[in-house]
Amino acid sequence: MPFATSAATTAATAFKIDDFVLYRDPAMFWAGKPGHTFVCRVSNVVRFTNGECRYNLLPVTGGLVREVQGDYMRLLPPADAMRDIDTAPLNGDDAAGGMTAAAMAWLTQQAATANRRPGLPALRD
């Protein structure tokens, strides 16, 4: 079986500022060191005159990773982060059992806002 090229196995992706990505540090990965893959937010896009892009990343645990090649990043779509809210069973005895605390807090806030009567603010003297 012939080996696939990286162009065939990976779709070219242009990342934008504030995208959340999964980053794999290639030096740590190939050295067999732990902690080589982590979640980051794209903080800056560095464009070179030859058309190449590099990305500055802010790991969610803190710090800064400079000028990363896009080949070592994968986009983390918002739909994946919000799936527990989008697919949560909202009826039944244990509807809240499968939801995270953040999802429950968000739904509680939405319900409180939706059930409040609209009104004007109190008059001030």
Image: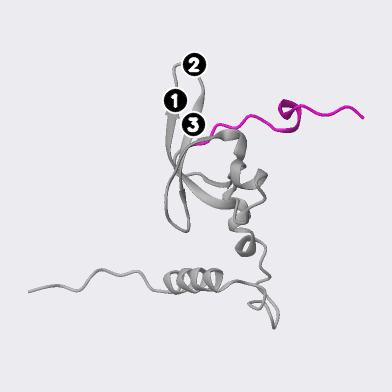
Viewer-nearest residue: 78 or 8: 8
Furthest-bottom residue in view? 93
**Residue sitting at 66 percent across and 67 percent down?**
88
Q: Residue 33: x and y, percent?
A: 63, 53
Q: Amino acid at mark 2?
A: Asn
**Residue sitting at 62 percent across and 72 percent down?**
99
Q: Amino acid at mark 1?
A: Arg
**Residue sitting at 60 percent across and 42 percent down?**
27
- The magenta span reads 1-16
Position of 121 relative to 50 (above/below): below
**Label 2 – label 1 distance at C-alpha:** 8 Å
Q: Does any portion of residue 74 appear in the rendered image?
A: no
**Label 1 – label 3 distance at C-alpha:** 7 Å
14 magenta-colored: yes
Provide the secondary structure element on which disc 2 rests.
loop
Provide the secondary structure element on which disc 1 rests.
strand
Instruction: Give yes or no for contact between labels 1 and 3 (Cβ–Cβ under 8 Å).
Output: no
56 magenta-colored: no
Residue at the disc numbered 1: 47
Q: Is residue 39 left or right of residue 6?
A: left
| Quarter where residue 125 is shown | bottom left
Q: Residues within 10 Å of mark 2 (few under 14, many from 20)?
A: few
Q: Amino acid at mark 3?
A: Arg
